Amino acid sequence: MAALPLSMPMSPTSSLFLYAETRDQPMHVAGLQLFQPPDGGDAEDARRMFDRVMDNEDVAPIYARRPVRSLRTLGQWAWETDRTFDLLHHVRNNALPRPGRILELLALCSRLHSTLLDRHRPLWSAHLIEGLDDGRFAVYFKVHHSVVDGVSALRLLSRALTTDPDERDMPAPWALPAHPPRPGREDEAGAAPIPGAALRSALHVAADAAGIFPALGRTVSRAMTEQSAALSFSAPRTLFNQPITGSRRFAAQSWPMERIRQVGKAAGCTVNDVVLAQCSGALREYLLAQDALPDSPLIAMVPVSLHGDEVRGEGGNAVGLVLCNLGTDLTDPAARLQTVHRSMTDGKAALSTMTPLQILAMSALGISPLGLYPLLGLNGRVRPPFNLIISNVPGPRDTMYWNGARLDGVYPASVVLHGQALNITVTSYSAEIAFGLTGCRRTVPHMQRLLGYLDRELAALEKAAGVR
């Protein structure tokens, strides 16, 4: 009789994404990558490259494990290696209908992003997309949020790329890493750390836990009067804060990083402040067009990565959050930018007084209404904790290649939730910054118009900052 596969405990944060998932609320993140074939090459060459990497079914452990929950795991979610792993189930070819514009590409990605991943198998899929009218090809890569967060997903993508346009015989993004994890660290499958490290971790947890309640008191006090704390009691109701369906719409566009950097330099703000202000102006214009702009400013939840030397492995989830006043009640773009800047500065200052464990605990309290409101039937009946999520995930700074094909763009697609029907995720790559908008197709009508509003708002910010 064959031995049963070993189960590895799943972290509480990762388990949460499985518990929260429903047909209307898929919990996967994705990325759309656009590639320019090497000189003299075309999309058929890309297909042949993929066929070659498909010959090797040795995948990284993080992509070979599936979620399980049984008596052996005491009813809790855990990971186990899929002994019947089938690479052809996870990697597929798609062709765009004519004329093969970006419009058709985004429509396909919208449909792919609407479907649930099969929990009986490892929670990811990759799609090679051909038929673009400009000769490029695309890859849509989808992975469950219980497996990785946005920072980890981009890190894993970058590992499969190179800055050398002449390098060939490169592995697929899901292949085994060229260099195994260093001894004494967790591997990608989530094995426990060595006993000494585990003991030190337990002592740190005990020390951090003692400070959670004082931190909670300070944060609740701040939340009563401002929006930059980890908890908020003053986000207005908007059309984004309603129950959702399982159908998604995905829209994406890039802008030169230098334009955003110049605005930030002239206004004394960070690049992320300018990005948030760009979103603020676009959301204001969108809601005005829908005759749905509230008198109070929208509040955005802005995830803050906690990744660092103390975070082991390459998968998992490690984020805190800041709630940002977007200033959508203000007509002046410069005033909106300064409001965003002050709010983010105050929020980061509050996080700086907490340990990572305390930040995670406070973030869990701040986001908990998203899980409680649907269970209690309160969606649309009470004020939401925040109006939408806006994430900024740093990507590769250099131009990257895969087997000679130049990576032209990276566009993130994320999760939307009941009561949070719109998500904006931003990714920097090379000299550009890409906005990926994910929304419920029914709850957020004409979502693609936000791309035009984002473009107009960046021009308005340039004018207000005196750089145009």
Image (cartoon, rainbow, N blue to C red):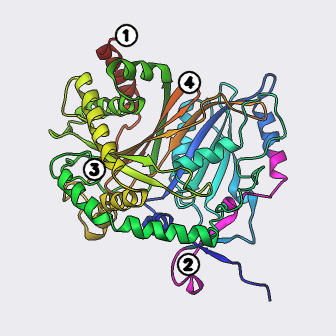
Q: Quick one: SS at disc 3?
A: loop
Q: Label 4 vs label 1: CA separation?
A: 19 Å
Q: Label 3 vs label 1: CA separation?
A: 33 Å
For image coordinates 84% across by 40% down, the residue present is 169
Is residue 142 visible in the rendered image? The answer is yes
Q: Which residues are magenta?
A: 51-77
Is residue 440 visible in the rendered image? The answer is no
Mark positioned earlier in the residue sequence (3 or 2)? 2
Circle 1 residue: 468
Circle 4 residue: 431
> Considering the image in quadrants, where does the C terminus appear?
top left
Mark positioned earlier in the residue sequence (2 or 4)? 2
- The residue mark sitting in front, 1 or 2, is 1
From the viewer's side, name the closer residue of 84 and 464: 464
For image coordinates 71% across by 38% down, the residue present is 161
For image coordinates 40% across by 47% down, the residue present is 303
Relative to 359, residue 329 above or below: above
Q: Position of residue 151 (x, y in %)?
A: 54, 47
Mark positioned earlier in the residue sequence (1 or 2)? 2
- The residue mark sitting in front, 2 or 4, is 4
For image coordinates 81% across by 40% down, the residue present is 49
Q: Position of residue 445 (x, y in %)?
A: 34, 41
| Residue 386 - label | 3
Q: Quick one: SS at disc 1?
A: loop
From the viewer's side, name the closer residue of 456 and 47: 456
The quadrant where residue 94 appears = top right
Q: Position of residue 290 (x, y in %)?
A: 25, 36
Circle 2 residue: 69
Amino acid type, callout 3: Phe
